[in-house]
């Protein structure tokens, strides 16, 4: 395999990059730093020669210092270009989120965004014009250099040496240059990992994936509440367990709180998809808070079963994970008649008043394999034990686990889109691993370690029920920046489930129309 060529326009930039690679033990057979010369004319001349010799066929990187255009960039920050342009061409750097994540994990302050290449030093007052066109940083070589990649993998890393407040022609340029070169040296080893991850790939997409009907409904409820009540609308706990969803709704005016005592009197509050205990509902009623209930109807069904079994005199064993909001809400329905069972060992600790009156229920997002083993243990100990009328593990959980099992069998690696506190996403990682395939949970492409991808030719992608579909698109696009990607949907089920909105919102919408 050819080494990756890293273009460094200036000798000091080349020295910084080589120093960083040497310190990380990266041999020149893997990454070769070449001095390409200062300014767009020398860059274009080098690119023409590189394109003719096929030097950039398998990927090309640019590393150097650059000027900040965005106001929040500081000297020593690193910019990873999502696109470089110079007015006559625009080159996409689709793998930028992967490299940016890698550099952040290396301890650098990193921003990914468009970089513009200009043909002379930016003069005082010109920064704002360039920034208004969308670029966050400026240089004099990246666009002509990366043209040599001819649509293949390309990245540009610019460490900030000057800012609009402290431009190139200022006494601070020496200290700015030193800070930038230090960052460039620290960034160099990540380019070696980017090089090792390059290559064409097959991507298998688990289907169904991403939002279930309960999550779609919960998000719509917050959006409608914002529309009907006006911002801010308070939401008790994360509406669904996903960082992107929560951040988007926060931008729209939602305020997420842990408990009702953080909600001011007279405010509106939404209960999350995971459900709440009667105690929380009572407190909201006592305080006259306007409430909207986004509890998933399938979680509400488990609550109803808990109430029914408890009132019939059963000890209810709730199979689930301690501390999960859904489990806390369900246990709150009949605390004196319920016991949490997290594993087979807990079954031995159940103490029913009547061993003929034991029932079991489940958290909706459990792994079917794991829960099945616990049910067997309950039935072994209490042969008359009774369960729910229909499965508590919901259709969305079951389908996503079947889909991840199907792709794991054919994949070298499985990536599961989802947040670390998402139970159903974590179960997808476990399901893939049980099928013998290494699997990782990622909130987005920025969380993918380039090391995971080295030597991997088939990647399976699944997404938890709370992960937005767009995240999967972002992951596929970022992988496409490392080489050609062929995608295939692996469909194990088709979902048509839809849930209606709660009456509070329907009534208000009807009154307003
Ligand atoms: S995962 Fe299942 S229980 Fe949870 S919100 Fe979605 S449909 Fe409802």
Image (cartoon, rainbow, N blue to C red):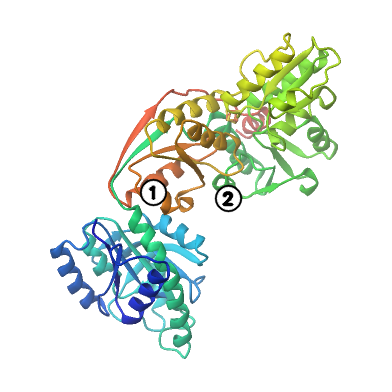
Relative vertical location of residue 105 with respect to residue 305 in this rendering, above or below: below
Would residue 208 be seen by someone viewing this image from the given angle? Answer: no
Q: Is residue 142 left or right of residue 57?
A: right
Pointer 2 residue: 247
The residue that mark 1 highlights is 453
Say what secondary structure mark 2 lies in: helix
Q: Between residues 127 and 43, which one lies in front from this camera angle?
A: 43
Specify few, some or many for label 1: CA neighbours under 10 Å numbering under 14, 14-19, or 20 or more: many
Numbered disc in front, either 2 or 1: 1
Measured Cα–Cα span from mark 2 to mark 1 = 28 Å
| 15 or 362: nearer the viewer | 15
Pointer 2 residue Cβ closer than 8 Å to ligand 1: no
Q: What percent of the width, then of the height, locates residue 269?
A: 72, 41
* Quarter of the N terminus within the rendering: bottom left
Q: Position of residue 371 (x, y in %)?
A: 62, 24
Residue sitting farthest toward the left:
52
Q: Quadrant of the C terminus?
A: top right
The residue depicted at 17 percent of the width and 64 percent of the height is 51
Q: Secondary structure at mark 1?
A: helix
Q: Is residue 354 left or right of residue 388?
A: right
Q: Quadrant of ligand 1?
A: top right
Q: Earlier in the sequence, mark 2 or mark 1?
A: 2
Q: Quadrant of residue 180?
A: bottom left
Residue 72 at x, y percent in the picture:
52, 70
Specify the farthest residue to the bottom: 171
Residue that appears at 36% across and 58% down: 194
Task: Report x, y in % for residue 210.
Answer: 49, 35
């Amino acid at each position: 395999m050819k080494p990756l060529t890293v273009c460094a326009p200036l000798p000091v930039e080349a020295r910084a990059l080589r120093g960083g690679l040497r310190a990380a033990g990266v041999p020149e057979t893997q990454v070769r730093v070449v001095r390409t010369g200062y300014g767009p004319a020398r860059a274009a001349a080098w690119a023409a020669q590189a394109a003719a010799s096929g030097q950039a066929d398998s990927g090309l990187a640019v590393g150097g210092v650059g000027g900040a255009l965005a106001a929040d960039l500081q000297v020593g920050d690193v910019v990873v270009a999502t696109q470089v342009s110079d007015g006559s061409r625009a080159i996409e750097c689709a793998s930028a989120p992967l490299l940016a994540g890698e550099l952040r994990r290396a301890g650098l302050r990193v921003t990914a965004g468009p970089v513009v290449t200009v043909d002379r030093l930016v003069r005082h007052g010109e920064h704002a014009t360039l920034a208004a066109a969308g670029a966050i940083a400026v240089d004099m070589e990246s666009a002509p250099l990366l043209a040599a990649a001819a649509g293949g993998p390309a990245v540009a890393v610019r460490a900030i040496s000057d800012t609009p407040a402290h431009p190139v022609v200022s006494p601070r340029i020496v200290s700015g240059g030193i800070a930038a070169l230090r960052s460039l040296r620290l960034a160099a080893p990540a380019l070696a990992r980017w090089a090792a991850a390059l290559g064409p790939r097959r991507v298998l997409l688990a289907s169904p994936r991403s939002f279930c009907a309960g999550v779609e409904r919960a998000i719509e409820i917050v959006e409608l509440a914002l529309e009907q009540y006006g911002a801010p609308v308070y939401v008790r706990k994360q509406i669904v367990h996903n960082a992107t969803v929560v951040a988007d709704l926060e931008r729209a005016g939602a305020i997420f709180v842990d408990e009702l005592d953080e909600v001011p009197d007279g405010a509106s509050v939404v209960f999350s998809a995971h459900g709440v205990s009667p105690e929380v509902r009572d407190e909201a009623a006592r305080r006259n808070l306007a409430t909207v209930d986004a509890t998933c109807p399938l979680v509400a069904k488990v609550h109803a079963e808990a109430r029914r079994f408890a009132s019939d005199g059963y000890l209810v064993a709730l199979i689930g994970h301690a501390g999960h909001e859904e489990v806390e809400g369900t246990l709150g329905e009949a605390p004196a008649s319920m016991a949490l069972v997290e594993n087979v060992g807990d079954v031995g600790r159940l103490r029913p008043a009547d061993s003929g009156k034991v029932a079991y229920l489940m958290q909706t997002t459990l792994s079917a394999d794991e829960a099945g083993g616990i049910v067997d243990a309950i039935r072994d100990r209490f042969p008359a034990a009774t369960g729910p009328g229909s499965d508590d593990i919901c259709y969305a959980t079951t389908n996503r686990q079947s889909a991840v099992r199907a792709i794991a069998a054919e994949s070298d690696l499985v990536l599961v889109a989802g947040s670390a506190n998402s139970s159903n996403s974590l179960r997808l990682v476990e399901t893939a691993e049980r099928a013998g395939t290494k699997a990782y949970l990622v909130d987005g492409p920025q969380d993918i370690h380039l090391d995971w991808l080295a030597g991997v030719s088939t990647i399976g992608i699944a997404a938890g029920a709370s992960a937005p579909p767009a995240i999967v698109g972002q992951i596929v696009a970022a992988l496409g920046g490392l080489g050609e990607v062929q995608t295939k949907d692996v469909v194990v089920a088709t979902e048509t489930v839809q849930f209606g909105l709660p009456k509070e919102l329907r009534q208000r919408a009807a009154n307003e129309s």
